[in-house]
């Protein structure tokens, strides 16, 4: 059907019923040329005859929610995709019909994220801490102030009490990391591939869209001198924390794999640790799952590390005797609970390590120790340098 609206001609072609909503689906285009309108009518009719048109007006949000319900992925990956959708994808084109998500739209979207993760238009604005009503600048008292000094009570000194000033700050453009944009692209491509399989769309525009280049790894592990200071500081805090940092530094084990270790995975006689599981926290729930590579592996331990873990097991056994319970092979290696039935919180371990390094004036994070282990294995100094750094720690306990 062609109908005139003012100085333009609107072409409307019936394309059946939307399988999701049950409503009539119509293709529409407009032009100011009557001859062009007839050509558009023939083209749209041919697309419908050849089934080369989108069969639904469902939004991209609907398609992504359907894909997340049906796609088989790890819970940690699902949580990441849901976060990317909520923060980045839905605000950009979540309510756009899936048939209108084009290659150009995706490439412009990726370009905006490379410039600013908030996709701002360059206008200055405040980044509010919360969407709830609040004061943009307020004092967060460590302890609530008492009664007024006029009544004879001491004054509340925020500086001495350690009170902090929290405020909403002006927006600063921060580009999204290329690796994060690539993960967002893979999620979008998965959604559009599913929509194509479901015959909601006829092609996948994400296949042709250019994604950011794979960033070249730039590991920044601590130096040998810094590693010695870090391990000394860890032993100074407490023996269990020192054992944890030591094990990561020497073996390069992932945080999730480290926290999932049970004593049944450790063979001190043979000097071997078996990596079988990951321990993660997703949506406030604790999950044990298989490793990142979905493969079990074994790590050989050097004599110094066997000594560290032997001492750590002796401390665990002593705690069990104090609570009148025997050591269990299914107990976790690192736990804050006396029963050792739940490992340390992953985020807590990361933050504790970061605070310790900040106090030492060292710019490092827990994952960087994996790179330290790899570099030292390449240059062949892991056993020498790290063992020397631990000698004072062993001496003060014996």
Image (spheres, rainbow, N blue to C red):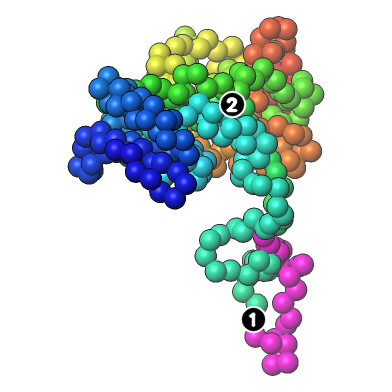
The reply to whether the C-beta atoms of the residues labelled 2 and 1 are less than 8 Å apart is no
152 drawn magenta: yes
Seen from the viewer's position, the closer of residues 67 and 366 is 67
- Mark 2 sits on what residue? 179
Q: Is residue 86 left or right of residue 193?
A: right
Is residue 137 visible in the rendered image? The answer is: yes
Q: Residue at x 64, y 13 (%)?
A: 374
The image shows a total of numbered marks equal to 2
Q: Position of residue 178 (x, y in %)?
A: 62, 27
Q: Is residue 88 left or right of residue 190?
A: right
Q: Residue at x 75, y 34 (%)?
A: 363
Q: Is residue 379 above or below residue 368?
A: above
Q: Position of residue 239 (x, y in %)?
A: 60, 35
Q: Is residue 168 above or below residue 172?
A: below
Q: Residues within 10 Å of mark 2 (few under 14, many from 20)?
A: some
Q: Position of residue 159 (x, y in %)?
A: 77, 67
Q: Residues within 10 Å of mark 1 (few under 14, many from 20)?
A: few
- Mark 1 sits on what residue? 146
Q: Residue at x 70, y 52 (%)?
A: 123
| Among the 4 quarters of the image, the one containing residue 222 | top right
| Among the 4 quarters of the image, the one containing residue 202 | top left
Q: Earlier in the sequence, mark 2 or mark 1?
A: 1
Task: Identify the magenta region.
Answer: 146-168
Q: Position of residue 338 (x, y in %)?
A: 43, 43
187 drawn magenta: no
| Among the 4 quarters of the image, the one containing residue 158 | bottom right
Seen from the viewer's position, the closer of residues 49 and 390 is 49
Secondary element at image label 1:
loop
Q: Is residue 165 above or below residue 31?
A: below
């Amino acid at each position: 059907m062609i109908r005139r609206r003012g100085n333009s001609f609107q072409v409307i072609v019936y394309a059946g019923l939307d399988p999701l909503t049950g409503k009539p689906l119509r293709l529409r285009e407009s032009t100011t040329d009557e001859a062009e309108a007839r050509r558009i009518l023939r083209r749209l009719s041919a697309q419908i005859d050849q089934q080369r048109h989108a069969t639904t007006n469902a939004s991209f949000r609907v398609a992504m929610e359907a894909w997340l319900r049906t796609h088989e992925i790890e819970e940690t990956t699902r949580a990441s995709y849901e976060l990317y959708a909520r923060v980045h994808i839905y605000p950009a084109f979540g309510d756009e019909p899936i048939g209108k998500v084009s290659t150009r739209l995706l490439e412009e979207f990726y370009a905006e994220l490379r410039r600013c993760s908030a996709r701002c238009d360059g206008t200055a604005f405040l980044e509010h801490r919360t969407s709830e009503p609040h004061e943009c600048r307020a004092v967060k008292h460590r302890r609530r102030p008492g009664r007024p000094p006029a009544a004879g009570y001491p004054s509340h000194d925020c500086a001495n009490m350690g009170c902090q000033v929290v405020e909403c700050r002006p927006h600063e453009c921060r580009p999204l990391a290329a690796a994060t944009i690539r993960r967002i692209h893979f999620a979008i491509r998965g959604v559009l591939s599913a929509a194509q399989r479901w015959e909601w769309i006829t092609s996948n525009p994400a296949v042709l869209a250019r994604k950011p280049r794979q960033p070249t790894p730039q590991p920044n592990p601590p130096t040998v001198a810094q590693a010695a200071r870090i391990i000394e500081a860890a032993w100074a805090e407490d023996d269990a924390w020192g054992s944890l940092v030591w094990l990561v530094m020497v073996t390069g084990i992932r945080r999730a794999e480290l926290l999932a270790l049970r004593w049944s995975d450790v063979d001190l006689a043979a000097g071997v640790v078996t990596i079988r599981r990951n321990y993660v926290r997703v949506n406030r729930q604790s999950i044990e799952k298989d490793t990142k590579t979905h493969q079990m592996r074994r790590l050989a331990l050097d004599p110094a590390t066997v000594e560290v873990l032997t001492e750590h097991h002796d401390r665990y056994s002593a705690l069990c005797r104090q609570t009148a319970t025997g050591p269990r092979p299914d107990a976790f290696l690192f736990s804050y609970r006396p029963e050792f039935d739940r490992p340390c919180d992953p985020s807590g371990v990361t933050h504790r390590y970061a605070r310790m390094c900040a106090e030492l004036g060292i710019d490092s994070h827990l994952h960087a120790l994996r790179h330290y282990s790899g570099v030292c294995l390449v240059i062949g100094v892991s056993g020498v340098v790290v063992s020397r750094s631990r000698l004072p720690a062993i001496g003060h306990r014996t």
